[in-house]
Every structure is written in structure tokens, then in C-alpha cells.
């Protein structure tokens, strides 16, 4: 069986955490949920993701570093059957 994998990676994504809960919507005043501008930063992460175009299976990992070792880890994940 041949797998056709569409792959993309996004290094340097900010890992952030909200400092307060979201503000709920208010009928007639605020149509959507609000969010405070303050956040806590937890560094950056890399996202590696792919979809097997033959089966539709989605594979993805989030890693702290962006090296060939992480890419190999992704390929090993994608090679395992669901």
C-alpha cells in the first residue's frame, strides 16, 4: 500500500496561557466572548503535521525543538497504522 502524505511544519509558535477567564457574551451589549489582553508566555513550540491523502488519517506532534530528530519522530508516527 502506498501512502501519499501532505506535510507542513510551523516552528516558533508562541505557547501562551490566558491570565483570566474569558468574558461571556452579553445580549444587546457584547455579541461574542471577550478575552483580556494579558497572557503568560511559556516559550515557543514547533508543530509538525501531515495528512495521508489516501486514507484521510491526520498525524501531528508538538515539540519544544525543531531539528531533524523531531522530523524523524513525526515520520515514525506517520508510519504506524491507526
Image (spheres, rainbow, N blue to C red):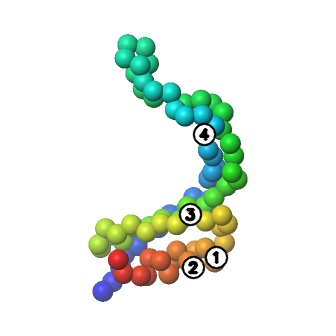
In the rendered image, which residue does mark 2 sit on? 72
36 to 53, vertically: above or below: above
In the rendered image, which residue does mark 4 sit on? 18
Residue shown at the point (37%, 17%) measured from the top left: 27
41 to 28, vertically: above or below: below
Residue shown at the point (31%, 68%) measured from the top left: 56
Q: CA distance from mark 3 to mark 4?
A: 19 Å
Tag nearer the camera, 4 or 1 = 4
Quadrant placement of the C terminus: bottom left
Q: Position of residue 6 (x, y in %)?
A: 42, 68
In the rendered image, which residue does mark 3 sit on? 62
Q: Position of residue 33 (x, y in %)?
A: 45, 28
Query: How many numbered discs?
Result: 4
Q: CA distance from mark 4 to mark 1?
A: 32 Å
Q: CA distance from mark 1 to mark 3?
A: 14 Å
In the rendered image, which residue does mark 1 sit on? 68
Of callouts 1 and 3, the N-terminal one: 3
Q: CA distance from mark 1 to mark 2?
A: 6 Å
Q: Residues within 10 Å of mark 3 (few under 14, many from 20)?
A: some
Of callouts 4 and 2, the N-terminal one: 4
Of callouts 4 and 1, the N-terminal one: 4
Of callouts 2 and 3, the N-terminal one: 3
Q: Residue furthest front?
A: 21
Judge from the rendering whether residue 80 lies leftward or rightward of residue 71; answer left or right. Answer: left
Along the line of sight, which residue is nearer the eye, 49 or 18? Answer: 18
Tag nearer the camera, 2 or 3 = 3
Marks 1,2: beta carbons within 8 A: yes
Q: Quadrant of residue 44?
A: bottom right
Label 1 SS: helix
Q: Quadrant of residue 65?
A: bottom right
Residue shown at the point (30%, 86%) measured from the top left: 1
**Res. 28 mark:** none
Amino acid at each position: 500500500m502506498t501512502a501519499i502524505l501532505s506535510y507542513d511544519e510551523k516552528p516558533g509558535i508562541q505557547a501562551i496561557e490566558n491570565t483570566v477567564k474569558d468574558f461571556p457574551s452579553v445580549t444587546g451589549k457584547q455579541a461574542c466572548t471577550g478575552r483580556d489582553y494579558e497572557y503568560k508566555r511559556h516559550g515557543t513550540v514547533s508543530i509538525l503535521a501531515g495528512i495521508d491523502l489516501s486514507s484521510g488519517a491526520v498525524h501531528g506532534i508538538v515539540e519544544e525543538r525543531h531539528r531533524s530528530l523531531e522530523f524523524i519522530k513525526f515520520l515514525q508516527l506517520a508510519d504506524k497504522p491507526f
